[in-house]
Image (cartoon, grey):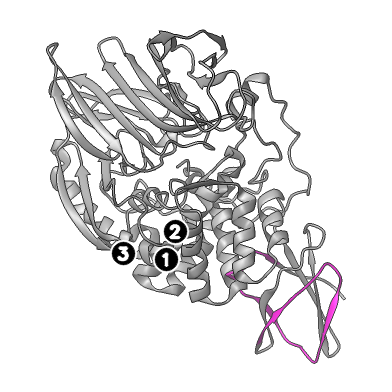
Amino acid sequence: MRYTHLLLLAALPLSTPLAAQGPTPKVYAHADSLRGGIDSPGRNWWDVTFYDLHVTISPADSTIRGWNGITYKVTGPGKELQIDLMTPLEVDSMVQGGRKIPFRRDGNAFFATPASKRVGETATVTVYYHGAPRPAVNPPWSGGFSWKTDSLGRLWIVTTDQGIGASIWWPNKDTQADEPDSQRTALTVPAGLTNVSNGRLRSTTKNADGTTTWEWFVTNPINNYAIAVATGNYAHFTDSYAGERGTLSIDYWPLDYHLEAAQRQWPQVRPMLACFEKWFGPYPWYEDGYKLVEVSNNGMEHQSAVAYGNGFANGYRGRDGSGTGLGMKWDFIIVHESAHEWWGNNITTKDLRDMWVHESFANYAENIYTECLFGKDSGAAYAVGTRRGIRNDKPIVPPEMGVNAQGSGDMYPKGGNMLHTIRQIVNDDEKWRGILRGLNQTFWHKTVTGEEIQRYISTQAGVDLSKVFQQYLTDVRIPVFEYRSLAGKTEYRWNDVVPGFDMPVRVTIGKTARTLKPTTSWQSLDGATGPVVVDVNYYVIPRAVSP
């Protein structure tokens, strides 16, 4: 998601060296801790196992009402459940075991006092609520409900809520750190409209008041921001893919008047799946299928129901962020958002500060897909081309945890180029592919920290990459490879780097290619003379200095 800076900043120079210090630390409020806290007293003693969400959508007055049954397992001592629901939505009541339970409100968080349970026991609290959810001003970047119409003036209602949180429209434990094992989503909409949500459609029920209830079910763990509403006048056609775990069902849901355009454009899904299964491992949600759903915004990685709004054309809204022309040969939204099925949905970060795991790998997946189509050199050229969208204005990973803080948009192209650089360090494509597949296997359907991902890559690569991750994720400077030619030798070192940075780099001196391991101290290579060229696949800045 949130990748427009890649195109809007395409005119910026390749890199902009800045001072090592980042921006002035932000002061966070109590509400930020409630929203972003993982181990807070209202969250750390219970584990969500199932959400049973039922929502009636009323476009006539832009309101919703419904309930969510939250089933949880007690994992430790605790007194209050923190259940999140953003203003102006209101909780009507909370019920457990047929009885109302007390609760108090603290901003966008509600603290309920359920009946006590022993560790290991399960219980369900049902939250009844109603109201007018916040409208999405500029979706998908500002979350909320989009009450729109299609080009024929018919209702078209969709949701987006990554970052801001799913509690913008439904009550839940609004943290990426805790996912239910499964979820039912039953959405009631006006007659004549089709609702598409995550997982598989279990039933449609025509109600006495003229509405229709569409019941969808996800049998796998799912992050809460992936649960989505897509309601409109949809057509439906199907396909299938013979993949690593058997036959995967593919369902396409374009607006009815875009059926032919979708039948022309969306078959790109099958080669995308083939490429990503080869490089990342099996598609994570065979039981829930793969869906592509047309929406009124650019797109979003809604698990098993990928949202699409790219105008049925290649590139990203008709543009190529790499400037190479290669991005115009495939559909950006299909590729980028589907990559999140592995990076973001299968592997989900616990804290928003580690969103680079989602977005850096999804950006890198664009390079991989280009490679699958046109070869390794083309994939590399695409990766290098995306550097023109890097700002280097603030770190990718903010220092704060537990406050719902997200780092720089550089997590897309800079993060992708960090991974492309690490591939050069590994210098073994099969080993690198094994690392990518191994990540998805090891952390299959799990929530993780960024540090876990870093340690896994270092361990499997057999190289300590901690300083590489530190440099590219927490510092705004790009490593500078300085060199100088002296009589009969070449000297070299790293500059503008974190202490202890010793990343190897491939260079050609004269006509001889070699891999060097510079440090921040000058090193000498006797007998090496001639022009110095640094392999462009490393995201570094070469700089000749005077002897």
Disc 3, SS: loop
The residue at which mark 3 appears reads as 244
Q: Quadrant of the N terminus?
A: top left
Image quadrant where one finds the C terminus: bottom right
* Pointers 3 and 1 in contact (C-beta within 8 Å): no
From the image, state whether disc 2 or disc 3 is nearer to you.
3
Q: Percent x, y for residue 420?
A: 55, 65
Marks 3 and 1: which is nearer the front? 3
Q: Residue at x 58, y 27 (%)?
A: 43
What residue is disc 2 on?
Answer: 365
Is 293 displayed left or right of 34 in the figure? left
Q: Amino acid at mark 3?
A: Glu
Amino acid type at circle 2 is Ala
> Which mark, by number, is residue 213?
none
**View extreme (front): residue:** 118
- The image quarter in which residue 22 lies: top right
Type of the residue with mark 1: Trp
Q: Range of the magenta residues? A: 513-541
Spatial CA distance of label 2 from label 1 is: 9 Å
**Residue at left 51%, top 36%?**
178
x then y, percent, for residue 283 = 35, 56
The secondary element bearing badge 2 is classed as helix
Depth check: give the residue in front, 24 or 172: 172
Indicate which disc, 2 or 3, sits on the residue closer to the N terminus.
Answer: 3
